[in-house]
Structures are given as C-alpha cells and as structure tokens.
C-alpha cells in the first residue's frame, strides 16, 4: 500500500505554547497522525496533560521550558527538541499573548510584550528550525496568525500589528526557503473560546453580536483546528506554500 498523504509517521514536530487551548489541540492532532512531538511552555509543569495526550497516541513526547521572547532560548530549545526527537520536520509557532487595551492607553511595555511574543519569538523559532531543516532539504513551518492579520479589531492594535507582521513573515520565508525544501504556511483561527480569549466570552451580548457575523452560526471548537495543521504538515500540502488558511466559519468571506 502507498503511504496515506496525511500520514505523519516518522515525522518529528515542535509545537510552542502547547500547554492548553489551540497549541495543545494541534500537538495532539499531530501525534494522532503519527508524529513524535516536542512541546514547549514557559513552565514544563503546565505541559503534563499535553504530554500525556501525545503518549496516549503511542508517540514520543518531549516537554521543554521556553519563553519565546528570549532569542537565545529559541535556538537552544529548538536544538534540544531536535536532539531529543532525532531530527525536526515540523514547527508550529503557536505561543502567543494578548491583552486588550484602548489604543490611547497602550504603553511601551505592553507593546513590547505582545510584539516580542507573537512576532519576534515566532521569527526566531522559525529561524532556528530552518537551520535544522535546510540541511535535510525538507520541513514544514506553520505559524498561528489571526483574523487580525486581515481586519482591524478595536482595542487590539498591538496584537493586530503582531499578527499582520507574522503573515508577512510567513509569505517572505515561504518565498526565500522554498528552494531549501521548507514550506511555510499559516493558520488564522477565527473565534475560538480559549483561556486567552475568555474575557470576551464572559460578555453574553458580545457573543450574540459575533455569532450573527459568523455564517456557520457557531464558535470554533478544538476539533476544527487540528486537521488543518495536519494537512499543512503533511504530504497532502506538498505544493501549498506561503498561504494562510482562515478557520473561521466563513467570517472573513462574509464581511
């Protein structure tokens, strides 16, 4: 039998910010598709559940502490993940931070925290992974962008700047690294209820307003995101490069 094109058996993946939410969901999906997975968070103590989910799929799991704002740590942890897994084929840049604030109240510290986590950290993790993948002549990097990569959201200017920048990084790296066999794509989740976005969902009026803007009439669920990451990491997406896939229930298509 030929190998199924979505099969990730033998692949080695690194997922940042994987202690919960979308990062945990993607790490689990990659493992269920056959990949061994290294996961990171600022504290390894928060990764116990994710590691257990990976191991329950029969795959190797490695948990590493990482603050993606630390450029040296990006290189070191990526190398540690590759050493533990005997190589690296997939990177998912999921680690992120958001804090809503009226633009007139944004200070330099908040701006730097959001941009350093979501944009600078993602680039230097990608750079570290690219240095490992390039000699092997293959690799898939998946960045977690956002609806704010496409549209302006009030009180989310630093976050939107970081995610718009990350979409630019995705396209530029895809063009530069394609000759090296490395594909770089992105996912833009729509409205998913996570720990980071919980503050919005506590407002019932906000929920009703947003649901009215989503053609499918519901918010995203964990099961909606994992398959997209598996697709972009797999041979099924061998000729997909430099693109961002919105997973938003039709939100962007309808505005």
Image (spheres, rainbow, N blue to C red):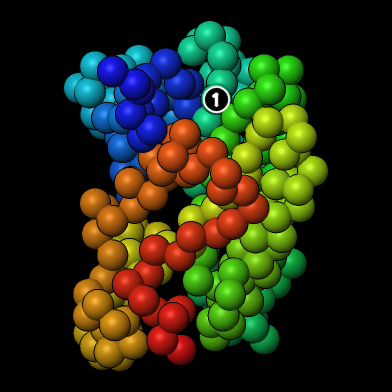
Residue sitting at x 26%, y 71%: 219
Classify residue 160 as left or right of residue 58: right
Which residue in the rendered view is the most extreme toward the right?
176
149 versus 141 height, above or below? below
Residue 176 placed where, x, y %? Answer: 79, 43
**Among the 4 quarters of the image, the one containing residue 236:** top left
Residue plotted at (39% across, 26% down): 8
Residue 20 in view here: no
Residue 119 is situated, as x and y percent measured from the top left of the image, at 67, 53
- The residue closer to the viewer here, 228 or 194, is 228
Q: Please tell me which residue lies in front, 75 or 253.
A: 253
Q: Quadrant of the N terminus?
A: top left
Q: Is 113 placed left or right of 204 in the picture?
A: right
From the image, tell me which residue sits under label 1. 89
Asked if residue 85 is positioned above or below residue 54 in the image, the reply reads above
Residue at 24% across / 59% down in the picture? Answer: 221
Element marked by disc 1:
loop
Which quarter of the picture shows residue 179? top right
Decide: few, some or many residues near mark 1? Use Cα within 10 Å; few <14, some 14-19, many ≥20.
many
Q: How many marks overall?
A: 1
**Which of 72/34 is in front?**
34
Instruction: Name the residue located 65 percent from the left edge and 60 percent from the top edge.
Output: 167
Picture quadrant where residue 129 is located = top right
- Expressed as whole percent of the image width and height from the top left, the position of residue 175 reads 76, 48
């Amino acid at each position: 039998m030929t190998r199924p094109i979505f099969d990730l058996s033998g692949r080695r993946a690194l997922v940042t910010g994987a202690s919960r939410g979308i990062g945990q969901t993607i790490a689990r999906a990659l493992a269920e598709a056959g990949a061994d997975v290294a996961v990171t968070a600022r504290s390894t103590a928060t990764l116990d559940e994710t590691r257990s989910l990976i191991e329950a799929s029969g795959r190797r799991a490695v948990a590493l502490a990482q603050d993606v704002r630390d450029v040296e740590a990006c290189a070191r942890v990526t190398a540690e993940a590759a050493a533990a897994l005997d190589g690296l084929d997939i990177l998912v840049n999921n680690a992120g931070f958001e804090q809503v604030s009226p633009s007139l109240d944004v200070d330099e510290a908040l701006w730097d925290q959001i941009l350093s986590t979501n944009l600078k950290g993602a680039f230097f993790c990608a750079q570290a992974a690219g240095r490992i993948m390039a000699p092997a002549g293959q690799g898939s990097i998946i960045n977690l962008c956002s609806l704010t990569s496409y549209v302006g959201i009030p009180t989310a200017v630093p976050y939107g700047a970081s995610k718009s920048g990350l979409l630019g990084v995705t396209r530029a790296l895809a063009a530069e690294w394609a000759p090296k066999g490395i594909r770089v794509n992105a996912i833009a989740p729509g409205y998913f209820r996570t720990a980071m976005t919980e503050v919005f969902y506590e407002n019932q009026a906000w929920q009703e307003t947003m649901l009215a803007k989503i053609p499918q009439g519901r918010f995203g669920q964990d099961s909606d995101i994992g398959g997209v990451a598996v697709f972009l990491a797999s041979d099924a997406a061998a000729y997909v490069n430099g693109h961002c896939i919105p997973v938003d229930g039709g939100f962007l298509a309808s505005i």
